[in-house]
Image: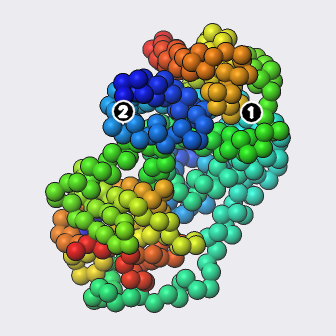
Amino acid sequence: MPFKASLVSHEYDDRTMDRRSDTLLVQSLMARDEDALRTAIDTYGRLVFGVASRILGEASLAEEVAQDTFVALWRRPGAFDPARGSLQSFLAGVARNKAVDVVRREESLRRTKESLKAEFETTAGEVTDPSASADIEERDAVAGALAKLSSLQREAIVLAYFGGRTYREVATELGIPEGTAKTRLRDGLIRLRELMTSTKES
Amino acid sequence: MTEERHEELKALIAPYVLGAVPLEDEEEIRTHLLSCEECMREADELSAVSATLALAAEPKPLPQGFAENVLAIVRDETAPGPAPAARPARRWFSLPAFGIAALLIVAAVLSGVLVNVVGDLRAERRITAALLRTDAIRLAGGGAVAAVVQEDGGSLFVARDLPGAPGDDVYQLWFLGSERPVSGGTFEASDGRVELRTGMSLDGVTGAAVTIEPPGGSRQPTSDPVLSSA
């Protein structure tokens, strides 16, 4: 019976990983290659821990969420679909969802609007590394676009996405009607897309 | 669906792709997206942006021993238990010579790609489309339905209403038609749904079956099928 041999390769050693090496890394994970998991942690661990830390103030919980994220990658590497984005955005998104689950279970862990806002205003848009790999370019594009949103749009998006609030809670917290909160989130996303596209072109 | 309700749901898509709608509203949004192309387009466009948003968080140095802790957890999980390795093969299929086929099976297990379908409505549509294809190999058992269809560069296995495999066990897909069952890969069900791409063409395949196997899968089926083709 014809079949496609799976390409298990170690070309992913290069730190500047592109989509092709994402796929190779995931294939090695499917082959239960522990070195591949170590490479994934070396490459994306700081990002994943950074995401979890942004959402959960408490370092020990953020560490737990980051661990869970890589354990999940090990259990089901095939959950990553290269057609839908980069591995780093997949892992960052998994960490975000896991961290928000924790915050929703335990409201006292929620970060305040003020602390979230302050963080995203001071750090967004910084150039992280002049040696710019594809990974860093993607991160800079997102952070840069977020920094360029109007402060009202950014506040709503950061509260919802990194603060774990529902749109209703966003409305209450900002003292605006629910309809306004929904519109602000939508307009913010559309503006982000425009900003990210213009970064790519420039 | 009234026009008014459609507009209300459409306005919820941005919060939805940001993971910011209350749990009780999610199901209605998902159901609506399945039948509304306009809203599905909106969800596609907005989720392409929201999917990268987490990258705005500043990376942070990992705590000491982080990688070792993760590796310890996964080693614990993959440590061979005493029982599973010893499970005998079941003879619901004929079992001829053991040879090159075994190598093919191992390669095939590795090439099966499980796509996480949670919240992925495009996946739900693909599952429905595959189940309805006239050239599908259809499987059934225990109230679940499944199908294998030919795709570019391989085949696609889909299932609906399949409960999670018991304990640490996994499901394993088998292609029938050659001398012995050939593995199409292992998988788990997520919300009852499965979408598994295999690198295997359906040339010469006359049937398919799904069994429950120990973690990591087996070289040959070790239990009776839970799903099988007619």
The residue closer to the viewer here, B125 or A42, is B125
Locate residue B116 relative to residue A113 in the image: left or right: left
Same chain? Circles 2 and 1: no
Q: Quadrant of residue B209?
A: bottom left
**Residue linked to disc 2:** B1
Is B149 left, or right, of B55 in this rendering? left
Is residue B139 in sight in this rendering? yes
Q: Is residue B202 above or below residue B14?
A: below
Q: Chain under label 2? A: B
Going by the numbered disc 1, the residue's amino acid type is Arg
In the image, taking residue A102 as reference, residue B34 lies left or right, namely: left
**x, y percent for residue B227:** 34, 72
Name the residue located 68 percent from the left edge and 34 percent from the top edge: A164
Q: Residue at x 43, y 83 (%)?
A: B222
- Residue B22 image position (x, y, % from top left): 60, 37
In the image, is residue B44 above or below residue A183? below
Q: Which residue is mark 1?
A: A54
Query: Is residue A2 placed above or below B121 in the rendered structure?
Result: below
Classify residue B181 as left or right of residue A112.
left
Residue B198 appearing in the image: no
